[in-house]
Image: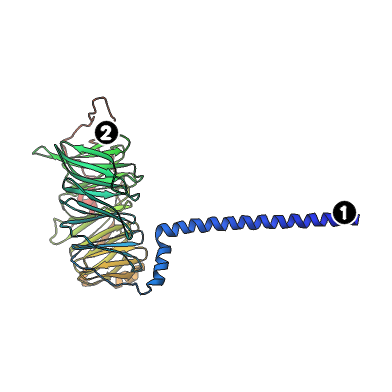
Amino acid sequence: MAQDELERLRKRKAQRQLVRRLVLLFLLCGALLTLYFVGEYLLQTGTLEDWFESLANPTASFPVALAGGTPLTLQASNRQLAVLTDTNLSVYRTGGRQLLNVQHLLTSPILVSAGERLLLFDQAGRSLTAYLRESETAKLTTEYAITTAAIHENGLIAVVTGALQHIGQVSVYDASGQTMIFQWLSAAAHITDVAFSPDGNGIAVTCVESDKTSLLTTVYFFRFDQAEPVAVAQLADMLPISTTYKADGVFVIGATYCAMIGQNGSILQLTDYAGSSLLDFSNESAAGAVVVLEDYTHYNTSHTLIFDATGVLRAEFQATAGIRDVHYGSDGTVTLLDSGMLYVLSAEGELLFREEVSMQSVGAVKLENSLYLLDLDYLRQLDYVRQSPEALAGSSSETDSHFMTESVDLPAPARPDSTSESHESSDTGEESVERTDDKPEPITQESSLSFG
């Protein structure tokens, strides 16, 4: 009996040891999987790279001196700041470490971005280069002059150029720039813009044509596995300026009004400028857009409209000083006035931050918890902390006493009569779209926007 009891004790001990080993093995596997996914995230976002680089270069910090030339634009996304001058393209991490500095030698340089990918091209020229962090990923020389271009986060490149026996063409290349995966030629209208769909499997192409008495803007929606557009929308009396994908489709900013168009070609929202002139805009973010108008009722007064990702007008503000730069980010609008005042507003138009900055500042963006200012010689950093209403009221000065913000509480507008319908391919390949010669009625009237 004693021997049997001893054997049972041995078996129990062996079972407990086996359970411990299995638990340890399970925890080890979980830790390894966690380390793998965390490592993948750190590699993809550049955080691990930044950490190692900070050890090698602990002095990287702001302000950073510009490489040279006259500053043109400042862009921010994914913990990365891109500064374009008329001679150089420089890219920095948010801690001040320089990732890239190249001399571009372009006559009319234009910079567009998607995530950490950058696309630099020469408008009206034939040169185009793509970058990812420190690396050049693609370089193209087009046969015809470039009108505009776009890049997707997956690296795909779309470029609009002239064409032989056509008014224009849009060509889509893979991330290396070596293989063309899609092309569309326009025989009747000028192509003004192109935008990638969020999934990277299609594009929206904006075109404009004139019959000497009016303008007609057409937006074509393409998928790369189909030759014909999957949807078409038309807008009367619009000169298109910018087209970007948002939550429900594409947001088109025109010279006299803007529109939100669903991916099936339906017109979801229209906002007329009530006779005001377009001065500036920010339409890069998928989260929304900002449109700056000249207030024709008051001298030297600008009026700014803030739209959400569905194309709905959410807020407005006006200032007697001119607006030098405006940027719509994922968590607010940054506005730099000619008077040297810098403002941050929420997506609903609530004033969150106000500070007087250098009169030499030419651009400003917000990224994470910092504001970045671009002036003639330096890229500078300001710590961002949301200010209390009392602090904002107390910091008001004569330089911005006429700055006014106001949330817009609009009733749900009736759907505008669409000048488009979903397009399906037919045997003849013709588009079943009717044109209307009437300019769409504005959803928002001057009185509801408190103009003047």
Residue 3 as seen in the image, left or right of residue 59: right
Q: Quadrant of the C terminus?
A: bottom left
What amino acid does circle 1 point to? Answer: Asp
Decide which of 53, 324 is in the foreground and name it. 53
SS for dot 1: helix
Its colouring scheme is rainbow
Q: Secondary structure at mark 2?
A: loop
Q: Is residue 392 visible?
A: yes
In the rendering, which numbered label is found on residue 129? Answer: none
Name the N-terminal-most of marks 1 and 2: 1
Could you tell me which residue is drawn at 31 percent across and 46 percent down?
A: 174
- In the rendered view, does 331 fall on the left or right side of 87? right
Q: Position of residue 110 (x, y in %)?
A: 21, 55
Q: Nearer the viewer, residue 378 or 33?
A: 33
**Residue 186 in the image: above or below residue 308:** above
Q: Measuring from the top left, give residue 38's x and y in whole percent.
A: 48, 58
The answer to which quarter of the image holds residue 117 is bottom left
Q: Residues within 10 Å of mark 2 (few under 14, many from 20)?
A: some
Residue 4 numbered mark, or none: 1
Dot 1: few (<14), some (14–19), or many (≥20) neighbours within 10 Å?
few
* Residue at 19% across, 63% down: 87
**Residue 352 in the image: above or below residue 280:** below
**Which quadrant is home to the N terminus?**
bottom right
- Can you give x and y, in whole percent of width and height, for residue 448 in the image? 24, 51
- Closer to the observer: label 1 or label 2? 1
Left or right: 442 in relation to 80: left
Is 247 located above or below residue 43 in the figure?
A: above
The extreme top residue here reads: 427
Return the residue at label 2: 421
